[in-house]
Image: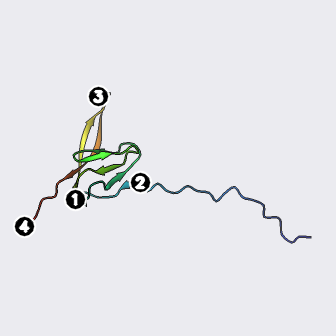
């Protein structure tokens, strides 16, 4: 006769990998062309000058430069406002 009960199977122990979303480069940092700045779902951040938005809403740099993040109010289609953060990449100024 067995001394312990049968273990059986469990339905626990599975979990999906995290998606690692968020800002990858902060305001004032240098980026290269094609470098990812923000990974997001939806449009928390809006692409501005010299940035592009991928099909999964990822924002990446279109030129080499410095990241500038600005806050603004955007007018929605139903005439309401929402606060938005715009991601820009400006050309890095040469220091002498």
Residue labelled with disc 3: 79
Q: Residue at x 41, y 54 (%)?
A: 21
Answer with left or right where residue 53 lies relative to residue 93.
right
Residue labelled with disc 2: 21
Lower position in the chain sequence, tag 2 or tag 3:
2
Q: Are marks 2 and 1 in contact (CB under 8 Å)?
A: no
Q: Are marks 2 and 3 in contact (CB under 8 Å)?
A: no
Residue labelled with disc 1: 28
Q: Residue at x 26, y 58 (%)?
A: 32
Lower position in the chain sequence, tag 3 or tag 4:
3
Which residue ends up furthest to the left in the rendered image?
Answer: 96
Q: CA distance from mark 1 to mark 4?
A: 19 Å
Label 4: which secondary element: loop
Q: CA distance from mark 2 to mark 4?
A: 37 Å
Q: Residues within 10 Å of mark 2 (few under 14, many from 20)?
A: few
Residue 27 place in picture, x, y as percent: 25, 57
Residue labelled with disc 4: 96
Q: Nearer the viewer, mark 3 or mark 4?
A: 4
Q: Nearer the viewer, mark 1 or mark 4?
A: 4
Q: CA distance from mark 2 to mark 1?
A: 20 Å
Residue 13 place in picture, x, y as percent: 64, 59
Q: CA distance from mark 1 to mark 3?
A: 33 Å
Looking at the image, can residue 86 be seen?
no
Lower position in the chain sequence, tag 1 or tag 3:
1
């Amino acid at each position: 006769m067995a001394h312990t009960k049968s273990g059986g199977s469990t339905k626990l122990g599975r979990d999906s990998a995290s998606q690692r979303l968020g800002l990858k480069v902060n305001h004032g940092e240098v980026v290269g062309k094609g470098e990812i700045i923000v990974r997001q779902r939806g449009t928390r951040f809006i692409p501005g000058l010299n940035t592009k938005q991928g099909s999964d809403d990822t924002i990446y740099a279109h030129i080499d430069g410095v990241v500038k993040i600005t806050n603004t109010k955007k007018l929605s289609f139903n005439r309401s406002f929402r606060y938005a953060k715009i991601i820009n990449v400006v050309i890095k100024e040469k220091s002498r």
